[in-house]
């Protein structure tokens, strides 16, 4: 490992970044200009994905059906907009202290439409939205599971990501070689609203890796009263499902199967699940 990569990772661990991965810009060659990192930072050489875990206990109140605000704070708004954002800007300032430009990127849905007009004929309209979830895959940290959410070998679906675009030449993180999702489809079976489209499986390809993902009727997801919520940034984005019954079932299944590095002394799911149709 080169000195820059090692020193940055050491600093990131010190600042409590749970996940860090480096994607060379060439891994984005198949991304259209409307979502490409170089549309924001033309000299970008590396896209750094930074993840912060959602602690399993943050989901406990939703799993029991007795406390929903804790997830909204420590699993969603505070985690992304405060804790992870502070980690991201701290690592960005480290890069700039070391003479490399660093552009921090929040996790905004690529489904959000442009809100302006191009400033030049050869540029896409603002605002360019990078697919942060796919970027985590390109950075060797994650895959898209059957449930449609980002899964990592460490935490399954329990994390959120932000990015840093930089002109620094980091050593690339290898892409995941083994799948996290075992295609058990328990996420689909757990949905009380039938939001999963039968026989609608599709293949999602990120940086050459093919992943089987269920087709989901997000109009039904938006009616969910089992832990899902609206997209926190824009109605065009998909609902937030990391606390929903389907994704909590994914947490329970990966936990029971022993597929995650962040293991626990006791199982996540201890009682029959509650549902609202």
Image (cartoon, rainbow, N blue to C red):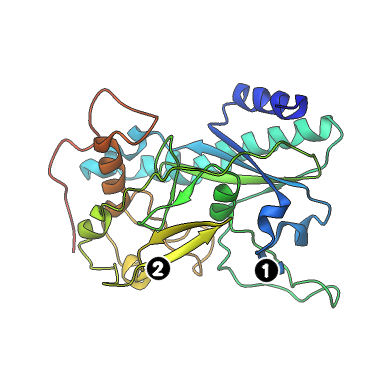
Q: Nearer the viewer, mark 2 or mark 1?
A: 2
In front: 133, or 200?
Answer: 200
Residue 32 numbered mark, or none: 1
Question: Which class describes the residues within 10 Å of circle 1: few (<14), some (14-19), or many (20+)?
Answer: few
Question: Which class describes the residues within 10 Å of circle 2: few (<14), some (14-19), or many (20+)?
Answer: few
**Which of marks 1 and 2 precedes in the sequence?**
1
Could you tell me residue 76's position as x and y percent? 46, 46
Q: Is residue 209 left or right of residue 40?
A: left
In front: 205, or 59?
Answer: 205
Considering the image in quadrants, where does the C terminus appear?
bottom left
Q: In the image as oriented, which residue stretches furthest toward the left?
A: 272
Q: Is residue 104 left or right of residue 200?
A: right
Task: State the separation of the CA atoms marked 2 and 1.
Answer: 20 Å
Could you tell me residue 256's position as x and y percent? 24, 36
Q: Is residue 188 left or right of residue 92?
A: left
In front: 174, or 96?
Answer: 174
């Amino acid at each position: 490992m080169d000195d820059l990569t090692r020193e940055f990772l050491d600093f990131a661990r010190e600042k409590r970044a749970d996940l860090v991965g480096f994607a060379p810009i060439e891994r984005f060659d198949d991304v259209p200009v409307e979502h490409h990192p170089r549309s924001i930072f033309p000299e970008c050489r590396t896209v750094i994905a930074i993840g912060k875990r959602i602690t399993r206990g943050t989901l406990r109140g939703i799993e029991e059906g007795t406390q929903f605000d804790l997830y909204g704070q420590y699993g969603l708004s505070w985690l992304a907009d405060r804790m992870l954002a502070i980690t991201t800007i701290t690592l960005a300032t480290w890069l700039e202290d070391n003479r490399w430009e660093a552009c921090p990127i929040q996790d905004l849905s690529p489904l959000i439409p442009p809100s302006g007009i191009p400033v030049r004929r050869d540029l896409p309209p603002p605002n360019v939205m990078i697919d942060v979830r796919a970027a985590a895959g390109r950075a060797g940290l994650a895959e898209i599971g059957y449930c449609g959410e980002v899964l990592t070998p460490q935490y399954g679906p329990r994390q959120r990501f932000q990015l840093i675009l930089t002109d620094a030449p980091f050593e690339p993180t290898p892409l995941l070689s083994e799948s996290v999702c075992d295609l058990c489809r328990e996420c689909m079976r757990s949905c009380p609203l039938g939001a999963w489209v039968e026989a609608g499986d599709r293949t999602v390809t990120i940086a050459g890796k093919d992943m089987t993902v269920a087709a989901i009727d997000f109009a039904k997801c938006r009616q969910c009263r089992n832990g899902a919520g609206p997209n926190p940034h824009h109605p065009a984005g998909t609902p937030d499902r990391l606390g929903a019954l389907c994704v909590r079932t994914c947490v329970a299944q990966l936990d029971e199967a022993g597929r995650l590095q962040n293991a626990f002394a006791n199982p996540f799911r201890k009682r029959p699940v509650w549902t609202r149709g």
